[in-house]
């Protein structure tokens, strides 16, 4: 099945997360879109009732496309910790509570890892997942998924990025996402498909819908 192509113009970035918005704007910029955020359009934040990243991305993209009459790109993402059975997973934002305190969310992850005796790096495997969904106002959707695997460090390192970035050391790297610039975290470039989960999902999206 070939994906439906999206040719420039206005695109709603259907997120209320500032860190994500900045990253998605970076990723779409080379394709010449006029990107507008869901927040700037005053769109409400839909309740994430799905049980998968893909379902939640779809729900957010559809809501924004319907409300705005424009194509909308949503991201649902999170950190899955193997020793914690995949938690916080789709609940990654909710673990930070209503004040979006990711210092607290990271401490919570660390405490649970300590309780499991997960000290060695091998016991501290985790991966980020991002599902990107593009929805058109007529109801058509395309969904893509990216992952990046690594280990969790303690204490957190770096103050770049957002969310759980300072705890996450990607495989084969010496710095956490919190110590990387956005360009390094995206990791896109000639011969590279991206380092972060979001950049990887975006590469698939770009190949299928923007470059085809
Ligand atoms: O739903 P929207 O409005 O997009 O914003 P959100 O923050 O609620 O986003 P999610 O529901 O997808 O929750 C994902 C959470 O996982 C975390 N997360 C996702 N991608 C991340 C990344 O690249 N680096 C660090 N943390 C990330 C981050 O804390 C997010 O709040
Ligand atoms: Mg959310």
Image (cartoon, helix red, strand yellow):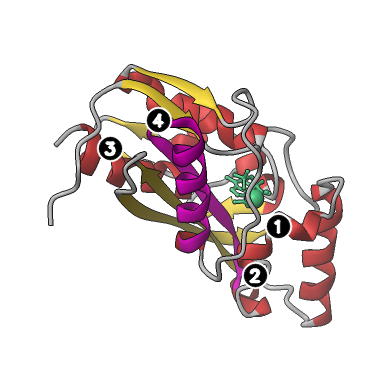
Residue holding disc 1: 153
- In the image, which disc is placed on residue 70? 4
Verify CB contact (< 8 Å) between mark 1 and mark 2: yes
Residue holding disc 3: 206
Q: Nearer the viewer, mark 2 or mark 3?
A: 3
As helix, strand or loop, the secondary structure at mark 1 comes to loop
Q: Nearer the viewer, mark 4 or mark 2?
A: 4
Looking at marks 1 and 3 on the same chain, the residue that comes earlier in the sequence is marked by 1
Q: Estimate the spatial distance between the alpha carbons at disc 1 and disc 2, rounded to whole Å.
A: 8 Å
Q: Nearer the viewer, residue 118 or 127?
A: 127
Q: Label 2: few (<14), some or many (≥20) within 10 Å? A: some
Q: Nearer the viewer, mark 1 or mark 3?
A: 3
Q: Label 3: few (<14), some or many (≥20) within 10 Å? A: some
Q: Is residue 196 visible?
A: no
Which residues are the magenta region? 55-81
Q: Quadrant of the N terminus?
A: bottom left
Look at 48% across and 62% down and name the residue there. 55
Q: Estimate the spatial distance between the alpha carbons at disc 1 and disc 3, rounded to whole Å.
A: 32 Å
Q: Nearer the viewer, residue 18 or 10?
A: 10
Residue holding disc 2: 124
Q: Is residue 106 left or right of residue 66?
A: right
Verify CB contact (< 8 Å) between mark 2 and mark 3: no
Q: Label 1: few (<14), some or many (≥20) within 10 Å? A: some
Look at 83% across and 64% down and name the residue there. 108
As helix, strand or loop, the secondary structure at mark 4 comes to loop
> Looking at the picture, does residue 33 appear above or below residue 18?
above
């Amino acid at each position: 099945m070939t994906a439906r192509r999206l040719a420039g113009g206005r695109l709603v970035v259907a997120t209320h997360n500032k860190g994500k918005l900045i990253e998605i704007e970076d990723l779409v910029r080379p394709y010449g879109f006029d990107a507008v955020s869901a927040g700037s359009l005053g769109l409400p934040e839909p309740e994430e009732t799905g049980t998968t990243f893909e379902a939640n991305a779809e729900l957010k993209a559809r809501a924004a496309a319907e409300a705005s009459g424009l194509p909308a790109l949503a991201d649902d993402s999170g950190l899955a910790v193997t020793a914690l059975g995949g938690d916080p997973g789709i609940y990654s934002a909710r673990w930070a509570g209503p004040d979006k305190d990711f210092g607290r969310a990271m401490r919570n992850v660390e405490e649970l890892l300590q309780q499991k005796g997960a000290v060695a790096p091998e016991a501290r495997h985790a991966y980020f997942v991002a599902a990107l969904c593009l929805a058109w106002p007529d109801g058509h959707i395309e969904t893509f998924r990216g992952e990046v695997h690594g280990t969790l460090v303690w204490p957190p390192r770096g103050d770049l990025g957002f969310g759980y970035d300072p705890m996450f050391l990607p495989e084969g790297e010496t710095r956490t996402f919190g110590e990387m610039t956005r360009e390094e975290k995206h990791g896109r470039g000639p011969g590279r498909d991206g380092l972060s989960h979001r950049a990887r999902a975006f590469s698939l999206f770009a190949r299928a819908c923007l470059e085809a």
